[in-house]
Amino acid sequence: KNGRQSQKESIDVFKCQILVYKLREEWDKAKSLFKELADIIEDVDTLTEYADFCLERGYSDEAKTYYQKALDRLHSKGNSQEEEAKNNKEIQISKKLETIQ
């Protein structure tokens, strides 16, 4: 197995465990593990998913922070992604941020 494959498997294990915590309504454990995952991976989707989770659970300050991190990450990606997809994601995240403020 290459490094990328095992990293993806590790991420999947994290996500499965987060899901188990959510299903058991162990919100603190889910939040803690989800935050750890978001901080490790720091990709736009994971940051946004964690921010969504925080918003749903009423942690609006934390949600704001992670939506902002997702936007910062989008901006730092440069032109490697398709511009249109990047702009759509930016609009979606910005709208979510506006609902908090």
Image (cartoon, rainbow, N blue to C red):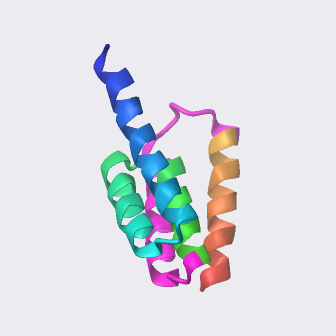
At 44% across and 72% down in the image, what residue appears?
Answer: 65
Query: Can you say which quadrant of the picture contains the C terminus?
Result: bottom right
Q: Main secondary structure of the magenta part?
A: helix
The one nearer the camera, 9 or 35, is 9
Instruction: Tell how many labels.
Output: 0
Side of 37 where 60 appears, left or right: right
Can you see residue 89?
yes
Residue span colored magenta:
57-84
Can you see residue 43?
no
How far across and how far down the image is residue 29, in percent?
A: 38, 68
Which residue of the protein is positioned furthest toward the top in this rendering? Answer: 1
The one nearer the camera, 96 or 10, is 10
How far across and how far down the image is residue 10, in percent?
A: 35, 36
Query: Can you say which quadrant of the picture contains the N terminus?
Result: top left
Side of 37 where 98 appears, left or right: right
Tell whether position 61 is magenta: yes
At 35% across and 67% down in the image, what residue appears?
Answer: 32
Which residue of the protein is positioned furthest toward the front in this rendering? Answer: 24
At 48% across and 47% down in the image, what residue appears?
Answer: 16
Q: Quadrant of residue 83?
A: top right
At 48% across and 39% down in the image, what residue appears?
Answer: 78
The one nearer the camera, 16 or 91, is 16
How far across and how far down the image is residue 72, in percent?
A: 44, 57
Q: Quadrant of residue 58?
A: bottom right
Q: Is residue 12 above or below residue 3?
A: below
